[in-house]
Amino acid sequence: MNLMILLVLVVLFIASAIRVLPEYERGVIFRLGRLIKVKGPGIIIVIPLIDTLERVSLRIVTMDVPTQDIITKDNVSVQVDAVVYYRVVEPDRAIVNVEDYNFAISQISQTTLRSVCGQDELDDLLSKRDEINDKLQEMIDKQTDSWGVKVVSVELKRIDLPDDLRKAMARQAEAEREKRAKIIGAQAEFEAAQKLTEAANLLATEPISVQLRYLETLSSIGHTNAKTIVFPFPTELLDLFSSVKKKS
């Protein structure tokens, strides 16, 4: 009976001492409160009641930064949110140097987002997102380096503008479109006028070209099936009749 109890205790001891860590996890071992080493992946042995195991994931974590109310450099109030991608590269530092690195990164991301976006004007905030993303990533990563955490990327997700400002920007965009349309129309009229002037000058220097155009017009009229036909009458004939009348 005693042997059976001893055997059961040995089995329970071994079962509690053996831990299995997957490839994406590491185990930080504390022995009587002192950091021993980082183990894993695979099978590791911990001493029950003496060793403490802290599991740390090495996979990339996606964290949404809550919407922040920001006043830009040109005194425009906007709401901005972002997403942060980070991963633990030194599990021992992530456990020892900070109490909760996930919560700490969330707070650092919020304050950095307000600080960086508040230094730019609204136009830069809308048009230079890549530069702002790089700046956010660099600043947050610099602060989390002592925690053994690497910030991989930071992306601005959405920038919400006030309704009155959004309407004003829509009116400005509409005015710009109308301006471009008028410029294009004026340019087309100018080019058409140039072509007409060139054509008129050519016809004035070559009288035979007027007759050719007249004959071409008659040919076009002959192919129509309209009941009413407007027949072009050359003014040269009127001049001819007028001169004959004067002579008679």
Image (cartoon, helix red, strand yellow):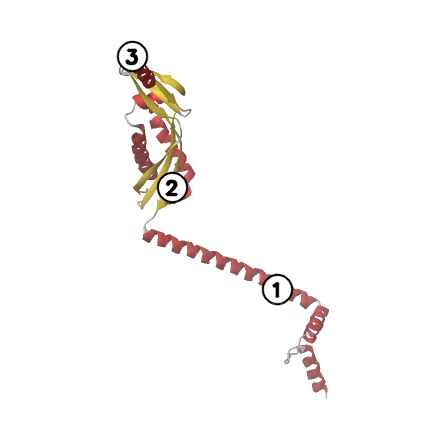
Frontmost residue, 192 versus 1: 1
Q: Position of residue 44 (x, y in %)?
A: 37, 17
Tell how many labels: 3
Residue 89 visible? The answer is no
Q: Residues within 10 Å of mark 3 (few under 14, many from 20)?
A: few
Left or right: residue 213 versus residue 86 is right
Q: Is residue 72 above or below residue 54?
A: below
Determine which of the numbered discs, if any, sits on residue 18 in the image. Answer: none
Look at 55% across and 60% down and name the residue there.
188
Residue at the bottom extreme of this rendering? 248
Residue at image mark 3: 6
How crowded pointer 2 is (Cα within 10 Å; few <14, some 14-19, many 20+) is rated as few
Residue picked out by circle 1:
197
Amino acid type, mark 3: Leu
Cα gap from disc 1 to disc 2, whole angstroms: 56 Å
- Marks 1 and 2: which is nearer the front? 2
Secondary-structure class at tag 3: helix
| Precedes in sequence: disc 1 or disc 2 | 2
**Percent coordinates x, y for residue 185 in the rendering:** 52, 60
Q: Secondary structure at mark 1?
A: helix
Q: Which residue is mark 2?
A: 157
Q: Which amino acid is tagged 2?
A: Lys
* Tag 1 and tag 2, C-beta contact below 8 Å: no
Could one spot residue 172 in this view of the protein? yes
- Image quadrant assignment for residue 206: bottom right
**Could you tell me the amino acid type at mark 1?**
Thr
Q: Which residue is painted at 70% across and 86% down in the image?
A: 245
- Quadrant location of residue 137? top left
Q: Dot 1, how many residues are within 10 Å of its Cα: few (below 14), some (14-19), or many (20+)?
A: few
Q: Residue furthest front?
A: 1
Q: Secondary structure at mark 2?
A: strand
